[in-house]
Image (spheres, coloured by chain):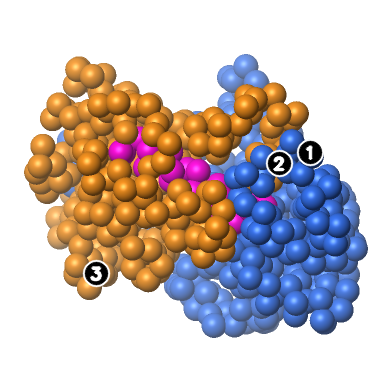
């Protein structure tokens, strides 16, 4: 059983005290935003750091607790107490993610305005080349201002968590691609000379010449973002690759979806929403290395003592949802847990309590 | 029923019997795939010929259907994992009658890249076109689609209209009319799945508004998935007393903490169940509540759908 009451959270404290970037990844619905806020709170209150948490789409209650509701795009100072550290939270406005990037990267205001007014702009930018995945990471350049010691980046929920770290790379590849050159080659010269290429011939038959020209005009404009965007992307990539960046992967104890092996680059895994009656154990049984499992501290027969079938069912469902938790770990990945607290996070005290109750080492049986 | 493609599909929906077409969508992680699998297996157990389409194509749908079908025996639903590349290949072969096979068109991946990343609405029209083709020409009574999550399903369902707006004259655009007719007909319906939690409820509200405002496809059902059992009263009574055991050993303490979590789940989710019911009422939707069952979620979901009469026409 996890015993609350200590204030040492070994893996996490080590991570928070040494790094200037912590990127929080994980499937949708595992509690990434809560974990990110908790990490920022911990770094500010226990390690005296000046922390910025960049968050995407927080739940209303959490946004209220942090005081950022209705203030997208602003670093809001969160009153975490009298300690030496400070905590700011910035909520990314995802709907305008590309507008912001266009503003930052266009060579001049006229180009930016022309792009924003283009017919195809909205339908194209909302869905292609990982713009959402990249835009949260783009805030890492704020480190260069010197106002923050640590930036915790909460990555967007989605189905492609593996893609997030590769987002900047894919964006860069797109701007360097032959595809973009083809798309922009039609402007001025017309498609006549290019139609001999089988690629464009098929594309034209599929889409029609007018549509192809329209697309081409858009990308010619879009390509003018290239120098500005590439400079930012390179800075973000250098920051992410440095030793001062850590990746934290979040799993939910009651997430019954299939579990993948921890990603190569993760420095630590946090198993979130662990029940008080579950004991996380790390063993060396797996052929690929270590694994973390959750073990119930009660037997199924113990539940017979409960009155009413409905209650037995509810408790059994809780146990079943977490009992199967089994995650393989890369050898150099450390594990921490966060407990499931009653009522979730409604204010800063809840966040503090969540961090305090989670600050315990987990049972470990290393080979 | 012939499965060969006519030269054009415009207007055929009047003469050819169609399958019922159901899209299952909702926020990521709420159990769309489980509910889609439940619809498909429920229809199959009533002897209907079912195609289940996996548009996300992570391979999650087939195993859920197999688990249940294996237990029930008989021919289960057919599962189709849909990728843009397949759909594009098929489209090029069927409609453009390009004299050479797509795969020999130099690197076909260039066309694929272009179509899927650069041309707005094209990926969606290929996906929904393939689904529509199966619904109209396939040997199915029911086509159940495990559709993409929230924002993406809007793009998928509005693709025919938006492509016609952006490119009114292209060859792809000429394929959009029959698709739009199919999507807007009363054979096509959407089920939105939600869980009683804060973010899914907020997103469901947004999704229902967008489906109403940006598409012509009818939503008829709201599934509230993973509703915790109602244990507040019995749980609180237990926690107030010394039960279940008079001793205060570690096991008793663990059980009491679990009961506290079960009560907390019930109490904290109930307002969201109510909010979802209010949403359903506001949008005129039928509600199906599915009790949380981590052991056999697909069976439980299918039973709840059956109780609700979701297959009344079978």
Number of numbered callouts drawn? 3
CA separation in Å, label 2 and label 1: 6 Å
| The N terminus of chain B sits in image quarter | top left
Which chain is tinted orange? B
The residue that label 3 is drawn on is B283
Q: Is residue A236 left or right of residue A123?
A: right
Report if residue A35 is visible in the image. Answer: no
Magenta-colored span: B116-136
Which residue is nearer to you in this view: A288 or A348?
Answer: A288
- Quick one: label 1, few (<14), some, or many (20+) residues within 10 Å? few
Q: Is residue B152 left or right of residue A218?
A: left
* Residue closest to the eye, B17 or B29: B17
Q: Which chain is blue?
A: A
Badge 2 crowding class, 10 Å Cα cut-off, few under 14, some 14 to 19, many 20 or more, is some
Residue B39 is situated, as x and y percent measured from the top left of the image, at 24, 39
Q: Which mark is residue A197?
A: 1
The residues tagged by marks 3 and 2 sit, at their Cα atoms, a distance apart of: 46 Å
């Amino acid at each position: 059983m996890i015993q609350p009451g200590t204030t040492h959270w070994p893996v996490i404290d080590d991570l928070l005290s040494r790094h200037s970037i912590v990127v929080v990844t994980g499937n949708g619905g595992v509690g990434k935003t809560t974990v990110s806020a908790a990490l920022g709170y911990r770094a500010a209150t226990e390690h005296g750091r000046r922390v910025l948490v960049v968050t995407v789409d927080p739940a209303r209650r959490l946004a209220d607790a942090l005081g950022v509701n209705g203030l997208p795009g602003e670093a809001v100072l969160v009153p975490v107490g009298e300690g030496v550290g400070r905590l700011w939270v910035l909520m990314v406005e995802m709907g305008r993610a590309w507008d912001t990037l266009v503003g930052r990267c266009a060579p001049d205001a006229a180009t930016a305005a022309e792009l924003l007014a283009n017919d195809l702009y909205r339908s194209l930018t909302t869905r292609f080349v990982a713009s959402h995945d990249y835009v949260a990471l783009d805030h890492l350049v704020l480190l260069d201002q010197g106002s923050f010691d640590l930036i915790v980046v909460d990555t967007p929920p989605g189905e492609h968590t593996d893609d997030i770290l590769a987002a900047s790379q894919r964006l860069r590849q797109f701007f360097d691609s032959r595809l973009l050159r083809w798309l922009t080659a039609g402007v001025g010269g017309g498609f006549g000379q290019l139609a001999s290429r089988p690629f464009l011939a098929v594309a034209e038959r599929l889409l029609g010449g007018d549509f192809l020209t329209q697309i081409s005009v858009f990308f010619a404009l879009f390509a003018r973002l290239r120098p500005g965007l590439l400079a930012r992307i390179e800075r973000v990539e250098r920051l992410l690759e440095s030793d001062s960046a850590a990746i934290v992967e979040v799993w939910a104890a009651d997430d019954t979806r299939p579990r993948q092996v921890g990603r190569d680059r993760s420095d630590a895994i946090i198993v979130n929403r662990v029940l008080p009656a579950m004991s996380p154990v790390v063993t060396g049984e797996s052929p690929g290395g270590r694994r973390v499992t959750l073990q119930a501290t009660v037997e199924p027969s113990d539940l017979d003592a409960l009155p009413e079938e409905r209650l037995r069912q509810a408790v059994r469902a809780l146990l079943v949802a977490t009992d199967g938790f089994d995650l393989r770990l890369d050898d150099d990945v450390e594990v921490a847990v966060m407990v499931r607290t009653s009522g979730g996070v409604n204010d800063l005290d809840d966040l503090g309590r969540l961090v305090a109750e989670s600050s315990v080492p987990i049972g470990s049986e290393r080979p | 029923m012939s499965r060969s493609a006519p030269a054009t599909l415009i207007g055929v929906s009047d003469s050819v019997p169609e399958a019922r077409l159901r899209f299952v969508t909702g926020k990521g992680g709420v159990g769309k795939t489980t509910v889609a699998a439940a619809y498909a297996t429920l229809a199959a157990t009533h002897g209907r010929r079912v195609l289940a389409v996996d548009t996300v194509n992570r391979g999650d749908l087939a195993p859920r259907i197999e688990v249940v079908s294996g237990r029930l025996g008989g021919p289960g639903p057919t599962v189709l994992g849909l990728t843009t590349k397949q759909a594009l290949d098929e489209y090029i072969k069927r409609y453009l009658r390009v004299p050479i096979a797509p795969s020999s068109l130099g690197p076909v991946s260039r066309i694929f890249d272009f179509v899927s990343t650069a041309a707005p609405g094209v990926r969606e029209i290929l996906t929904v076109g393939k689904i529509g083709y199966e619904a109209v020409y396939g040997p199915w009574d029911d086509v159940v689609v495990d559709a993409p999550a929230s924002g993406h399903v809007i793009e998928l369902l509005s693709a025919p209209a938006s492509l016609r707006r952006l490119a009114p004259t292209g060859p792809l655009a000429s394929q959009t009319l029959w698709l739009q007719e199919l999507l807007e007909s009363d054979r096509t319906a959407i089920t939105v799945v939600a869980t009683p939690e804060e973010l899914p409820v907020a997103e469901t509200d947004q999704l229902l508004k967008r489906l109403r405002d940006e598409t012509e496809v009818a939503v008829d059902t709201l599934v509230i998935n993973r509703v915790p059992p109602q244990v507040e009263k019995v749980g609180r009574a237990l926690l107030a007393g010394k039960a279940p055991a008079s001793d205060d050993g570690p096991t008793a303490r663990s059980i009491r903490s679990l009961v506290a979590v079960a009560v907390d789940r019930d109490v904290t989710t109930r307002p969201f169940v109510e909010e979802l019911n209010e949403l359903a009422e506001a949008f005129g939707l039928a509600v199906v509540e599915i009790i949380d069952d981590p052991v056999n979620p697909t069976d439980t979901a299918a039973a709840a759908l059956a109780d609700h009469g979701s297959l009344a026409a079978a």
